Image (cartoon, grey):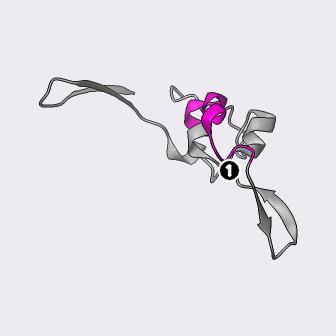
Amino acid sequence: MIEKIKDENEILTLTEELREERLTGECNDIQIWGKKVCKDCPLKDDKIFDNKSNTWKHSCGGEHIRITGRNKKGFIVPIDISQ
């Protein structure tokens, strides 16, 4: 559903409703807007050292999505809001 809202300055804002049950704990930006947001993301290639497992891990919350094109629930990214 697309809703048109005008504020007191007559600025038109379009809002879209996304069913929350389609989202996962992965990066919300990539799930909603697609891989194009990764281009400018500072976390894309960033890694942090995990002392508990003694390994390097990616800071990016959308790494799985960037590789597969789907979130962990299997929805193609960006998630189609029309369904």
Asked whether, in this view, residue 38 is left or right of residue 64, the answer is: left
Report helix, strand or loop for mark 1.
loop
Residue located beneath label 1 in the image? 61
Write the residue at 62% across / 47% down: 27
Q: Is residue 83 one of those drawn in magenta?
A: no
Q: Image quadrant of residue 55? A: bottom right
Category of crowding for the residue at label 1, using alpha-carbon neighbours closer than 10 angstroms: few (below 14), some (14–19), many (at least 20): some
| Residue 42 at x, y percent in the picture | 64, 44
Q: Amino acid at mark 1?
A: Gly
Q: Image quadrant of residue 57? A: bottom right
Indicate whether 7 appears above or below 29. above
Quadrant for the C terminus, please.
top right
Query: Magenta region, mostly helix, strand or loop?
Result: helix
Q: Nearer the viewer, residue 15 or 19?
A: 15
Asked whether, in this view, residue 71 is left or right of residue 28, the answer is: right
Q: Please, which residue is most extreme toward the right here?
A: 54
Write the residue at 73% across / 46% down: 72
Write the residue at 56% across / 40% down: 29
Asked whether, in this view, residue 53 is left or right of residue 3, the answer is: right
Magenta span: 31-45
Quadrant for the N terminus, please.
top left
Q: Please, which residue is most extreme toward the bottom here?
A: 52
Q: Is residue 36 one of those drawn in magenta?
A: yes
| Residue 10 at x, y percent in the picture | 16, 23
| Residue 24 at x, y percent in the picture | 63, 50
Asked whether, in this view, residue 68 is left or right of residue 82, the answer is: right
Q: How many marks?
A: 1
Q: Nearer the viewer, residue 30 or 55?
A: 55
| Residue 13 at x, y percent in the picture | 29, 27
Write the residue at 68% across / 50% down: 61
